[in-house]
Image: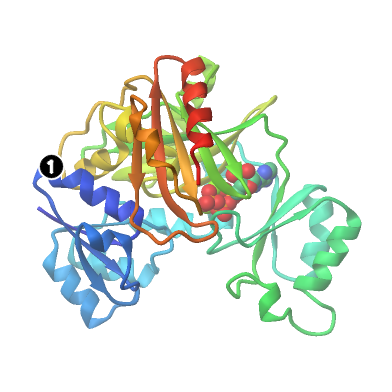
Amino acid sequence: MKVGVLGGGQLGRMMAIAGYPLGIEFGLFDPAKDACGGQVAKLHNSPFEVTEELKKFVDEYDVFTYEFENVPLELAEYISQHKPLYPGKDALYYSQHRLREKQLFVDLGVPVTKFSKVDDRASLLNAGQEVGIPFILKTTTLGYDGKGQYRVTSEAELAELADKLFPEDGEACEHTTYAGVSEYIAEAFVNFTRELSIISVRDQAGNCVFYSPAENEHRDGILHLSVAPAANLSDEKLANLQSYARKLLEKLDYVGVLSIEFFETDEGLVVNEFAPRVHNSGHWSMEGSITGQFENHIRAICGLPLGDTTNRSVSAMYNLVGHDVNRSVMTESDVHLHWYGKEIKDKRKVGHVNILAENYDSLNKKIEYVDGQII
Ligand code: ATP
Ligand code: MG
Ligand code: MG
């Protein structure tokens, strides 16, 4: 079996690494010549468009997947007409656009925060009444790692933002918009106690398995630490997380790994967003679960039986963002370095460290130790 992956970054790279023991071959498609997945699998360099290169890529592989949700829909359409693409186009259609995504959750009965569409000065100024202040304004498309987001905490800030994004005399300058996107969603600020995510997998026959939900800590809008299983999660919340995930998996006739981010509040769970792919908050599963998320994704899309998602122990994923880590961490038992082979740059995810321990106390001590080894 030959798997073609759209995107040649660390997620594609880790899919390939997980799939090789199963005898699966990989080709990655990415415009960047130095995409780090190219170090472990065949890299096809071309823009994400239906080019001759892309057509050749589609001919060469048996089944297709992607490592990012912004795959152009025309490209997904072209692939689907020729070969299986998992997860399918629907998953991309909804996850690429925050308004569609939120409305889908409403339709499925999954709790969301109040939201409204913003696409001009009036609708932005009105958002204060619609969803209440404070709120977060996010571009409907293309944002990740907190990019393309603005926090509004007062009427004065709202007026200032309106002047910046929708000036009364003309259009916002390019440098004040994110990636040229001028359609937004205003989301009421969720006063969460913590952030949780659940990684689930559905196979081609419709069987679903779930990983233990993780508790996630962000720094500067970028995931810093995931701990799984999330401590002190009630049985009721666990059941809710799984049932929300199942609803989305079934609605999208999904095949592969699905990730959903939630806020936990005193009033219950509120969904944030989903990603139709393997996810940074699931990296702990590479050693922390009997079967890691990358292997299970590959199993699902290749029509193989899914693997056991039981935790081996409590575990954590410590992200290496713009920093290296002292190799001495490797002397610690059950501490696993994953280095992506990328050049270190500010705010760039260059690797992660998975940490397993017998209980949360010793896990926290190991996390502190790793924290002290960052260079
Ligand atoms: P990702 O890299 O996870 O795809 P993203 O750019 O799509 O990030 P979000 O996940 O929507 O952004 O938001 C980033 C972070 O900002 C969240 O993890 C959370 O900490 C905070 N945040 C987002 N929306 C809200 C909200 N409505 N209320 C409170 N905090 C929020
Ligand atoms: Mg996102
Ligand atoms: Mg997010």
The residue sitting at 41% across, 62% down in the picture is 343
> Pointer 1: what residue?
21
Quarter where residue 174 is shown: bottom right
The three-letter code of the residue at mark 1 reads: Pro
Relative placement, left or right, of 254 versus 375 is left
Please count the marks in the image: 1
Give the camera-side residue of 183 and 81: 183
Quarter where residue 352 is shown: top left
Question: How far across and down, in percent of the image, does residue 260 sit?
Answer: 48, 40
Question: How far across and down, in percent of the image, does residue 173 sit?
Answer: 71, 81
Residue sticking out furthest to the right: 156
Give the camera-side residue of 188 and 146: 146
Relative placement, left or right, of 95 versus 85 is right
Give the camera-side residue of 219 and 46: 219
The residue sitting at 37% across, 49% down in the picture is 277
Relative placement, left or right, of 135 versus 335 is right
Relative placement, left or right, of 141 versus 202 is right
Q: Is residue 236 visible?
A: yes
Question: How far across and down, in percent of the image, does residue 24 sit?
Answer: 12, 50
Above-or-below relation of 367 to 222: above
Above-or-below relation of 209 to 295: above
Badge 1 marks a residue whose secondary structure is helix
Question: How far across and down, in percent of the image, does residue 230 sit?
Answer: 50, 24
Estimate how packed mark 1 is, as few (under 14), some (14 to 19) or many (20 or more) residues with alpha carbons within 10 Å: few
The residue sitting at 34% across, 73% down in the picture is 31
Give the camera-side residue of 148 and 169: 148
The residue sitting at 18% across, 69% down in the picture is 58
Q: Is residue 7 visible?
A: no
Above-or-below relation of 270 to 142: above
